[in-house]
Amino acid sequence: MIDQLYQKAILKHAAAATASGALHGADLTLMVHNPLCGDRITVHVNLDGPKIKDFSHETKACVLCQASASILGECTIGETEQSLQRVHDGLLQGLQEDELENKIWPDDKWNTLNIFQPVSNHTNRFTCVTLPFDSLLKALRGKNE
């Protein structure tokens, strides 16, 4: 069962750690911790108006969260709070309804999120996948939680 969660594609994205590290002089920085599993992510963002100009993350978390943060690092430049909320909502809905495999995303660059299809059978792991998105959205909204 654990092999389903940690497929090669998920491990590959986690290992890539795209946009990993601190972004010094960031417009926004926010750390979010999931006390249930211990995942912790700090997001750093520079903005150009409402659009994300630069993004990085420092992720100390399970492989699912690391992979999700890496995908976010690949795809988030040029996005806005509203566009990221749509992707987040689609990701959560796809997990809940076990429909990620055939999900149609607002932009093809997000198709990589389909690799999380096996997580649909593990509701206790949904937060592992969505935490990077939650963190970035909270930062964009100026929440310090």
Image: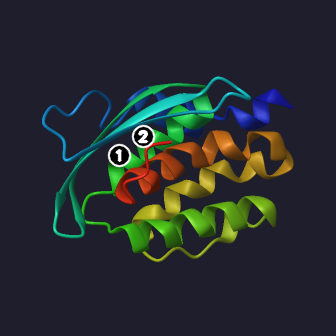
Residue 8, visible in the rendered structure: no
Which element is circle 2 on? helix
Percent of width and height locating residue 94: 71, 65
Q: Looking at the rendered structure, which numbered label has been put on residue 27?
A: none
Looking at the image, do the residues carrying marks 2 and 1 touch, with CB atoms under 8 Å apart? yes
- Tell me the residue that label 2 is attached to: 70
User: How far, Cα to Cα, is label 2 from label 1?
Assistant: 5 Å
Instruction: Decide if residue 90 is in sight here.
Output: yes
- Tag 1: amino acid: Gly
Crowding near pointer 2: few (<14 within 10 Å), some, many (20+)?
many
113, above or below 42, in the image: below
Residue 27 image position (x, y, % from top left): 19, 47
Q: Residue sitting at 68 percent across and 44 percent down?
A: 127
Q: Which residue is mark 1?
A: 73
Question: Which amino acid type corresponds to the residue marked 2 in the rendered image?
Answer: Ser
Name the residue at 63% across, 32% down: 34
Q: Position of residue 35 (x, y in %)?
A: 68, 27
The count of marks equals 2
- Element type where label 1 sits in the image: helix
In depth, the one of 67 and 128 nearer the eye is: 128
Q: Residues within 10 Å of mark 1 (few under 14, many from 20)?
A: some
Residue placed farthest to the front in the image?
144
**Residue at left 75%, top 40%?**
125
Question: In the depicted view, which residue is nearer to us: 7 or 100?
Answer: 100
Q: Is residue 83 left or right of residue 39?
A: left
